[in-house]
Image: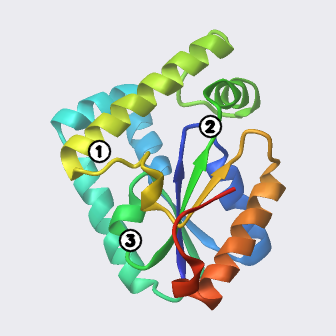
Amino acid sequence: MLISITGRLGSGKSTVCGIMKERYGFEIFSTGAIQREFARRKGISTLELNKRMKENPELDDEIDNTVTKMSIEHKGENLIFDSRMAWHFARDTFKIFLTIDPMEAATRVFYHRSSCEESYTDVNDACEKLVERSMVERKRFIEIYGVDYYDFNNYNLVVDTTSKTPDEVVAVIMENYNSYISDPEGYGATRQC
């Protein structure tokens, strides 16, 4: 079964995906990497790119169509979609949302990223810009798709990463993923950890 992981900025999605790739052999398709590269080529921040994409949704369409196509072509493979909206477009995925306290997210992004797509003067500035970027994305997705990716009812599993290590997050994901695979109907509604 395929996995789709989304969540708040700075929640550890990329780190978790990297661990799952290394330990369990998952391949990763990151729509964020595509957007960051596109913004870099244009010489703008990802926040600015998100604002521009609201008026010109061609990149969204391209990414969404690619996610759907990949989910069909790679069914049954170990593939993780690291994407805000893959839960909505990819077929038959175990849907995960990673949440985090905004100030903890800002601290992580400010101090621990080797390459930031945004520049920040301090942790408070990082928090403000991350929250603004998140709200721009959320509003854009509601307008374009009519769905709220912050609605936890869209997911099989919600994990709060605020006080968990990446290894602990992966352990929670894999435990729930294996439980879901063995009995999808018995897994039930959204689980929060």
Residue under pointer 1: 141
Q: Secondary structure at mark 1?
A: helix
Q: Secondary structure at mark 2?
A: loop
**At x 46% / y 83%, what residue is drawn?**
74
Kindly report the distance in space between the C-alpha atoms of the residues bearing marks 2 and 1.
19 Å
Quadrant containing the C terminus is: bottom right
Mark 1 residue crowding within 10 angstroms, few (<14) / some (14–19) / many (20+): some
Question: Residue 40's x, y, as percent?
Answer: 44, 34
SS at mark 3 in the image: loop
Q: Quadrant of the N terminus?
A: bottom right
Query: N-terminal of the two: label 1 or label 3?
Result: 3
Q: Amino acid at mark 1?
A: Phe
Going from N to C along the chain, the mark reached first, 2 or 1, is: 2
Give the residue type at disc 2. Gly
| Residue carrying label 3 | 90
> Spatial distance from mark 1 to mark 3, Cα to Cα?
16 Å
The picture places residue 182, in percent across and down from the top left corner, at 64, 90
Position above or below: 97 against 52: below
Residue 68 occupies quadrant: bottom left
Q: Position of residue 135 (x, y in %)?
A: 39, 30
Q: Is residue 114 above or below residue 187?
A: above
Q: Is residue 123 left or right of residue 48?
A: right
Dot 2: within a 10 Å radius of its alpha carbon, few (fewer than 14), some, or many (20 or more) residues? many
Residue 59 as seen in the image, left or right of residue 178: left
Q: Toward the viewer: 75 or 88?
A: 88
Residue 125 seen: yes
Q: Is residue 46 visible?
A: no
Report the side of 132 relative to 167 (left or right).
left
Q: Residue sitting at 36 percent across and 37 percent down?
A: 137
